[in-house]
Image (cartoon, rainbow, N blue to C red):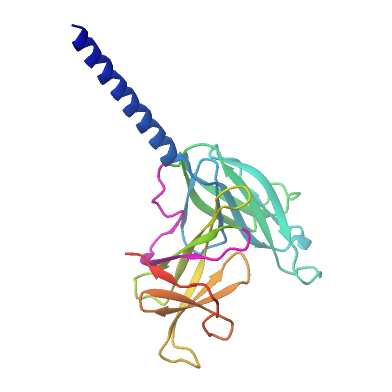
Amino acid sequence: MKTFTTRLNSLSLVATIAFVAVAFAAIAQTKQPPRTVQIGEFHAQVHVSLHVGDTLRVVLPSTPSTGYSWHAVGGIPLLKTIGSTNASAAESSVGAPGRQTLAFTAEAPGTSDLAIDYSRPWEKGKPAARQYTFQVTVDDGTNSTASPVVIDGSAPVGTYSGKLPCADCSGLLTSIALYAADSAQSPVGYYVRTSTYLGAPKGDVVFIEAGNYLLRRGTPANPDWTVYTLQSNTSDHLENYRLEGDALVPLDSDDKPIQSPFNMRLKLQS
């Protein structure tokens, strides 16, 4: 009887240890670095996927000197508005273009449309001059495989990843996923770049941005090259990458490979 009780206690202890191990593994699996997802305006239906606690930044063109500004229409329980800022244009004249950034935090799981109107706040009852609407899905953080930005009608081309040098962190894990507009052979599409700052001062940080790309077959100096030009839709920034075998090689403004003692290539993921 004593042997049976001892064996039962041992089995119970093993089961408890296994349960605790599984629980800690689940916590480790669900705990992820905070993410910031930044998007601009796409002329297609957009779906944005967030985890609870993520920050969403929507950057849209605006001319604040005319009195117009972007405002989220109503409120959705998934998101909490945390701020709005304007980036002034170089010109200070009336009508000079600028950009407005609206920031939200993901509060609760669910799916809803986010509508943002471009209007003058004092013109009550008047239809908005423009409206930008996209769908937002928020989960608890366990669904980490889904692309944070998806556009209807797009076709995946490939995802290129690598670890790049970082001035204020131990390394910058960079992944660029390319999606063609219609088919994999389309010369235009969009990209989603995920940048993970490892060992940053406040811990690992993930920044995700989406924009458009143009596929060029050849350059003036190198007619046999294939070059992807990435164009942010939240700024005027352009980047060029040469397709070299199964890798993307960053180019400078003269379409020459960037010279660096570090490996700057992003390799195609199988």
Nearest the viewer among 155 and 97 is 155
Residue at 50%, 93% in the rendered image: 221
| Occupied quadrant, residue 15 | top left
Is 135 on the left-hand or right-hand side of 68?
A: left
| 119 shown above or below 109 | below
User: Which quarter shows the C terminus?
Assistant: bottom left
| 40 shown above or below 246 | above
Q: Most extreme residue toward the front, as rendered? A: 3
Magenta run includes residue 159: yes
Q: Where is residue 241 in the image (x, y as percent from the top left)?
A: 48, 77
Q: Most extreme residue toward the top, as rendered? A: 1
| 28 shown above or below 206 | above
Nearest the viewer among 134 and 161 is 161
Magenta run includes residue 196: no
User: Which quarter shows the N terminus?
Assistant: top left
The span shown in magenta is 142-168
Q: Position of residue 227 (x, y in %)?
A: 46, 81
Residue at 55%, 72% in the rendered image: 231
